[in-house]
Image: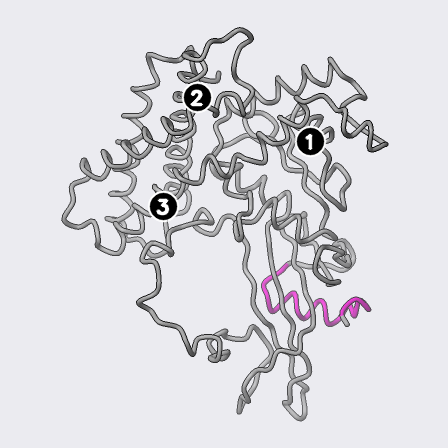
Amino acid sequence: MLSTYDTARLQTLAQHIGFEFDPATCAVDVSVDYRYRNVVLTETGGTRYAELSETDTQIPYVSDPADGIVDERVFTSRYDDWDPSELDPDEAHDKSLHGLIEERDGYVALYRPRSKSLDCLHKFTIINGPEGANNLHRLLGRKPGIDIPTVTVGGNATDQSTAGQITEAIADMKILTPGPNYFYLAAHDLGFEGGGHGPSWPNTPASVYCHLSRVAQDAVDTYGDQIHYSTEEEKANRPHVIIAIAKALDNLIFRLRPAMQSFATMELRVRDGRYNELSNQDIAMSLVQAAVKQSADRQHYLADTLLAVPQGAGESERYRRGYFIGLQMVSEVAGTRLALHEVRPHPEASLHHTRRALDIISAVKLDIDERIANNRAFTLA
C-alpha cells in the first residue's frame, strides 16, 4: 500500500500524472475521509492535491506496455451497454470554467522492467488546492481577501468547519477548506463534480461576499465566544445568525447553478451548430427571460436567506430585494463568463464561436444591468 510512503514510487507516479511533487518540501498525507485510506500529495506551492491508491482493477493485456496513464477506453466493459441516444445533448456544457477548476481522475500503470508484466495499477484524482483556487480567482480578475474570500486551510483543518469558524472566516474575508488529509471534503469545497462548490466562488458577486462579511463581523462583535461550542447544549443554543451565515455560503452553488448552466449550455449550442439559425438577439433575449424567471421564482426567500432584509422591512420590499439581488447574481455569472473567455477560450471553440458567445453574454449582461440600474436601493452594495 502506498501509505508506506515509497518516495521513489510517489515521485514516479507524480511525474506520470503531471504533478509537481518535491518530497523535500511537499506534504504526504494519508486521507482519512468517508471512504478509505489513501495517500495524498500536495503540489509545490499548494496549488493542487493528488490522491493515489492502489487498485485491483483489471486491465487488458498490452503487447508492448509502457508506464503511464491508462487510456480509459481499454476498460471497454463499462461501455458495453452504452447507448449514445440516451445522452443529454447538453450534458457536455462547461462545468469547470474551461478546466480552471481542476478535478480529474484516471489510472496510471507501472510495469516490471524485465517481464513487462503489470507491477501495479494506481487510481489517481487531482483537485485544486487552496492556492490553486486563489490563482484561478486572480486569473479572472478578482482580488482574494478584498472582493472575493481567500481560500485557506483552516477551521478544524482535518474535518468540516463549524458554523462559528465559518463566520469568523468570512468576517475576515476567508473561506475555509480542510487540509489534504480530508481529501474528499476538500474536493467537495473546491471541485465541481457531484455538486462541488468550486464554481460558486468565482461566480458570486463581490457585493454578496462583502455583505456577508459585514454581517459576520457584527455577529462576532455581538456574540463573541458564543458563536462556538464545546458541549451539545452550547451547540444547540448558538445564535441563529451564525447558522444562517454558514447556510448562506453553502447554498451559493444552488442559487447560481441555473444561471451558470444557462450560459454554458448556450455556449455549447453555439459551438456545435444548434444555434446557427438563431440570431444573437433572440438567444440573448431567451437568456434574459430565463434570468428574470429565476429571480422572480426565488424572490420570496432569497433576500431573507442572504440576510439582506432590513429590520422592519415589509413583504413588498423583501420581495423586491430578493428579485433584484437575484438579477445581481445572474449579472455576475455573465461577468465571470466574459472574463473566462478572455483568459481561456473554450479549447473546442473557434474564434467565431468565442466572439459570438461574448457578444451574446455581453448583450444579456447589458440588459440585466439596465434593469438593476434604477433599483440600486434594493441590491447589495
Residue drawn at 67 percent across, 18 percent down: 217
Residue drawn at 24 percent across, 36 percent down: 284
Say which of marks 1 and 2 sits in front: 2
Residue 252 vs residue 223: left or right? left
State which region is magenta.
2-19
Tell me the SS state at disc 2: helix
Q: Mark 3 highlights which residue? A: 264
In what quadrant of the picture does the N terminus appear?
bottom right
Q: Amino acid at mark 1?
A: Ile
In the displayed structure, would residue 36 be above or below residue 241? below
Toward the viewer: 362 or 379?
379
Q: Residue 333 at what x, y percent from top left?
A: 41, 34
Instruction: Tell me the distance, in whole angstroms, between the alpha carbons under discs 3 and 2.
Output: 24 Å
Q: Residue 309 at what x, y percent from top left?
A: 52, 14
Question: Which residue reaches farthest left?
Answer: 277
Instruction: Tell me the distance, in whole angstroms, between the alpha carbons under discs 3 and 1.
Output: 30 Å
Toward the viewer: 189 or 130?
189
Task: Kindly identify which numbered label has been placed on residue 322.
Answer: 2
Which numbered disc flags the more N-terminal residue, 1 or 2? 1
Q: How is the image coloured?
A: one colour
Instruction: Tell me the distance, in whole angstroms, between the alpha carbons under discs 1 and 2.
Output: 24 Å
Tell me the SS state at disc 1: helix
Mark 2 crowdedness (10 Å alpha carbons): few <14, some 14-19, many ≥20? many
Residue 34 colored magenta?
A: no
Chief SS of the magenta region: helix
Say which of marks 3 and 2 sits in front: 2
Q: Mark 1 highlights which residue? A: 166
Give the quarter of the image for residue 291.
Answer: top left
Asked whether the residues under the numbered discs 1 and 2 touch, taking CB atoms below 8 Å apart as contact, a structural biologist would say no
Q: Amino acid at mark 3?
A: Ala
Residue drawn at 36 percent across, 13 percent down: 375
